[in-house]
Each structure stands twice: as C-alpha cells, then as structure tokens.
Image (cartoon, coloured by chain):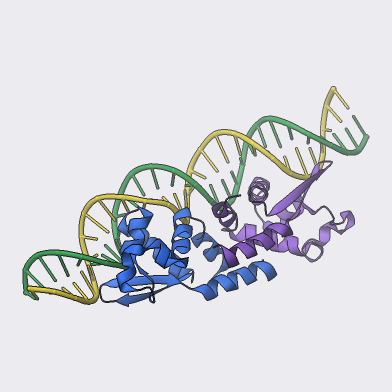
Chain colours: A blue, B purple, C green, D yellow
Amino acid sequence: MEQVEIFKALSNKTRLNILAWLKEPEDSFPGQKEFGFEHGVCVGQIQQKAGLTQSTVSEYLTTLQRAGLVKSTRLGQWTYYRRNEEAFAALSQLIQSEL
Amino acid sequence: MEQVEIFKALSNKTRLNILAWLKEPEDSFPGQKEFGFEHGVCVGQIQQKAGLTQSTVSEYLTTLQRAGLVKSTRLGQWTYYRRNEEAFAALSQLIQSEL
DNA sequence: GAGATATATCGGCTTTTCTCGATATATCTA
DNA sequence: TAGATATATCGAGAAAAGCCGATATATCTC
C-alpha cells in the first residue's frame, strides 16, 4: 500500500475513532459481548457508536481495509472488522526510518 | 496539534516528497550548497524540485509547519525550512502507543 | 420461496483539497 | 527611492472526500 493512501485513511476523525475503539473492543462495544471479539466487531455496532449512516461507516471500513489498517471476516450475515496490528507497527517503523 | 491535522498534512505525495528531500538536503539540493543547510532549504529550491508553482509550494510548507512537521527561519529575503525531527519521533511513538 | 436482517454499492449534494495565476509584502541593491 | 528578488496570501476553478438516502446483494429463518 502506498504511504500516502495510509495517511489519507488516517485523515478523518471518525476513522481514527474507529481504530481507537477497535483497540479495546470489550470496553468500546459492550453490546456485542455475547458474540466475542476474536473476529472483531461487526459493522452495525461500529455504526451505532459512530453515529453516522450505515453506508458511510461501511465505506470508511472499506477505506481502512484498503489501507491495510484493518482486516475483516465474514461470518453469516455479519462482517467483523479488527485492527491489523502489524500494519501499525510497520507504520511506526516507517516514520522512524524512512519518512 | 490535532492528530488528524498531522495525517492530513501527510496525505499528499508532494508534501511527503518535500519531507524526504529535507531529510538529506545535501543530496537533494546540490544547488544550494554555497549557503549551507544549518537553517534548512529555501522555498525556491524546494519549488524547483517539486515542479509546482511558487504559491502552491509555499502553501504546502505552511501546511507542514502548521502540523509541526517542519520549522522555518527567515534570513533576509529567504525563508529556510527544515524538518522538526522531534515531531516525527513523537508521531512514531503515538502510533505505537495511542493510535 | 418470502420476508427479515446485515452489509455493500451507487448517485448525488456539499465541503474540502489541489493547484494555479495574480497580487501583496518584505528585503536587498543600486 | 526604484527596481529586483523571494516569499506569502488571495481568489477561483477542478478534483477529491464527506456523507447521505436509495438500492443491491448476501445470508438467515420460516
């Protein structure tokens, strides 16, 4: 993924919030605790917390995924999103060394 | 400076290039070697290398400065820009711990 | 198969960003 | 002071991003 695309994905307050929420999903999404968090958090929960429409949040998650910052798993009718921690480690490293 | 503003400043290929050039100014701007690089590189040199208009490059440098990523020094009729390495270290750290 | 639910995609309107040319400001030099 | 040079700021048109409602697709349940 191109560096600039990663930074574009991070250039939005809601998307930054989503990433922060996904860092502590148990605290951020108590409404989903019965499903567990191994595969991440489903779109509906994120949408509710973000307070934007379903289409916008879905698009934001796609943006984050194209940047490599999150991964998704489809289970039945739900899509679960979770952070890709390797991407964050790599980004931190990149800023230290290359940027 | 707000996180999202830093990422917005980094969301442009030319601005990323400028930051990369300022990392190795001796290699990137041989045309300025007679003036030294202690205070940075002047806008004209950066503009020439970027291949965009003077006004655009000036604005980009202002954007980077507002984000805290570069510092400037005015000497006579020249403004010299240089990287603010502390900001990059802080950003790398932020991505590791908070983001 | 029909309806319900979850997510993704599409079309469009609004706001922001990109980038330019023109102009303003500051400094230098003659 | 006049002109030259360097940079900053302004105004505007084009492109991209933000965000929505409507619709499409996929899965589940009956």
Q: Is residue A76 above or below residue A96?
A: below
**Residue C21 position in % (x across, y down):** 61, 41
Q: Splitting the image into 4 quarters, where does residue B87 fall?
A: bottom right
**Residue B33 position in % (x across, y down):** 86, 59
Question: Residue at the location (64% across, 64% down)?
Answer: B93
Q: Is residue A98 visible?
A: no
Q: Is residue B24 left or right of residue A86?
A: right
**Residue A84 position in % (x across, y down):** 48, 73
**Residue B41 position in % (x across, y down):** 78, 54
Question: Residue at the location (38% across, 55% down)?
Answer: A50
Q: Is residue C2 left or right of residue A94?
A: left
Question: Residue at the location (55% across, 62% down)?
Answer: A7
Q: Nearer the viewer, residue A66 or B1?
A: B1
Q: Nearer the viewer, residue C18 or A48?
A: A48
Q: Splitting the image into 4 quarters, where does residue C9 fall?
A: bottom left
Q: Is residue C2 left or right of residue A89?
A: left
Question: Residue at the location (39% across, 76% down)?
Answer: A38
Q: Quadrant of the C terminus of chain B?
A: bottom right
Q: Is residue B4 above or below residue B23?
A: above
